Amino acid sequence: MTERSLQVTYRKGRAFAAYLHLSHPTGEKSARTVASQDGLLIVDYAGSGRPLGVEIAAPQAVPLDRLNQLLAELGEPPLAEQDYRPARAA
């Protein structure tokens, strides 16, 4: 089992994209992806239908409340403000 973690990619000192790895058994692969209507949040699902992670295509445009709403819909616990702060770095 891996712990939930946030990976942030920076470009010119600003957060460019982020990926929230959800806690899941090691070795599960993404079988399908589902994007939000605006394409800012993209959920990767395993073949079993279990959510594996969430890509945040533009962290500056996605407030923590919106991400936590999606996590609640997925049955996942909310992300703490201090854990999301690196993705919102200006």
Image (cartoon, rainbow, N blue to C red):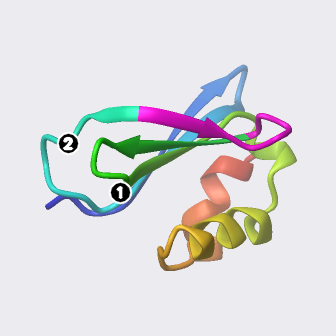
Q: Position of residue 9 (x, y in %)?
A: 56, 30
Which element type, helix, strand or loop, lies under badge 2?
loop
Mark found first going from the N terminus, 1 or 2: 2
Q: Residue at x 52, y 35 (%)?
A: 33
Q: Residue furthest top?
A: 12
Determine whether 85 is above or below 16 in the image.
below
Q: Residue at x 29, y 42 (%)?
A: 47
- Quadrant housing residue 45: top left
Which element type, helix, strand or loop, lies under badge 1?
loop
Residue 60 seen in render: yes
> In which quadrant is the N terminus drawn?
bottom left
Query: What type is the residue that disc 1 sits on?
Result: Arg
Q: Which residues are magenta?
A: 32-40
Local crowd at mark 1 within 10 Å, few (<14), some, or many (≥20)?
some
Asked if marks 1 and 2 touch (Cβ < 8 Å), the reply is: yes
Q: Residue at x 82, y 44 (%)?
A: 60
> In which quadrant is the C terminus drawn?
top right
User: Which circle marks residue 50 in the picture?
Assistant: 1
User: Which circle marks residue 28 in the picture?
Assistant: 2
Q: Position of residue 55 (x, y in %)?
A: 57, 40
Determine whether 85 is above or below 59 in the image.
below
Q: Nearer the viewer, residue 57 or 15?
A: 57
Q: CA distance from mark 1 to mark 2?
A: 10 Å
Local crowd at mark 2 within 10 Å, few (<14), some, or many (≥20)?
few
Q: Residue furthest front?
A: 48
Q: Nearer the viewer, residue 22 or 8?
A: 22
- Quadrant housing residue 84: bottom right
Query: What type is the residue that disc 2 sits on?
Result: Glu
Q: Residue at x 73, y 47 (%)?
A: 89
User: Which circle marks residue 5 in the picture?
Assistant: none
Residue 90 seen in render: no
Q: Is residue 2 left or right of 39 when viewed as pictured?
A: left
